[in-house]
């Protein structure tokens, strides 16, 4: 946003660099590539996974680098948590005019 304050832009850029640094430390190359691909298709879901990984890293809950298989498991967890239940409801209205009674 060109109208945004330059200090805000710098803060966002620093935050993005910190996020990338943390993710580079906790993900192996294949997992990082998968997360990048996900970010292209579903940026919201990728952001949620990134936040989850960063939170786990900050609290020391990650034993080592997360492999691609580990990332897939995390993706499944996040998907289950954010899964939206969709229901379809048909509201059929009764019409005074019936098709069965054709008046010509």
Image (cartoon, helix red, strand yellow):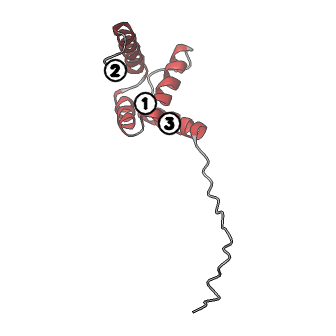
Quarter of the C terminus within the rendering: bottom right
For the residues marked 3 and 1, what is the alpha-carbon distance in whole angstroms?
A: 12 Å
Q: Secondary structure at mark 2?
A: loop
Task: Report which residue position mark 3 lands on.
Answer: 75
Q: Earlier in the sequence, mark 2 or mark 3?
A: 2
With respect to residue 25, does 80 lie above or below?
Answer: below
Q: Residue at x 39, y 10 (%)?
A: 8
Quarter of the N terminus within the rendering: top left
For the residues marked 2 and 1, what is the alpha-carbon distance in whole angstroms?
A: 35 Å
**Nearer to me, 95 or 46:** 95
Q: Secondary structure at mark 1?
A: loop
Residue at the limit of the structure toward the bottom, as seen here: 104
Residue at the limit of the structure toward the left, as seen here: 2
Q: Residue at x 56, y 36 (%)?
A: 77
Task: Report which residue position mark 1 lands on.
Answer: 67
- Residue 4 is situated, as x and y percent measured from the top left of the image, at 36, 15
- Residue 70 is situated, as x and y percent measured from the top left of the image, at 48, 33
The crowding category of the residue bearing disc 1, from other C-alpha atoms within 10 Å (few below 14, some 14 to 19, many at least 20), is some
Q: Residue at x 36, y 13 (%)?
A: 9
Viewer-side label of 3, 1: 3
- Residue 97 is situated, as x and y percent measured from the top left of the image, at 65, 79
Q: Earlier in the sequence, mark 2 or mark 1?
A: 2
Q: Is residue 74 left or right of residue 24?
A: right
Q: Residue at x 63, y 54 (%)?
A: 87
With respect to residue 98, does 67 lie above or below?
Answer: above
Residue at the limit of the structure toward the front, as seen here: 104
Task: Report which residue position mark 2 lands on.
Answer: 1
- Residue 30 is situated, as x and y percent measured from the top left of the image, at 35, 32
The crowding category of the residue bearing disc 3, from other C-alpha atoms within 10 Å (few below 14, some 14 to 19, many at least 20), is some
């Amino acid at each position: 946003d060109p109208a945004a304050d330059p200090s805000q832009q710098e803060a966002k850029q620093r935050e993005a660099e910190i996020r990338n640094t943390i993710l580079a430390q906790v993900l192996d190359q294949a997992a990082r590539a998968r997360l990048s691909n996900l970010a292209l298709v579903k940026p919201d879901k990728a952001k949620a996974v990134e936040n989850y990984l960063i939170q786990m890293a900050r609290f020391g809950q990650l034993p080592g680098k997360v492999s691609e298989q580990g990332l897939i498991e995390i993706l499944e967890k996040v998907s289950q948590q954010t899964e939206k239940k969709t229901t379809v409801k048909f509201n059929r209205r009764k019409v005074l005019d019936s098709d069965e009674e054709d008046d010509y």
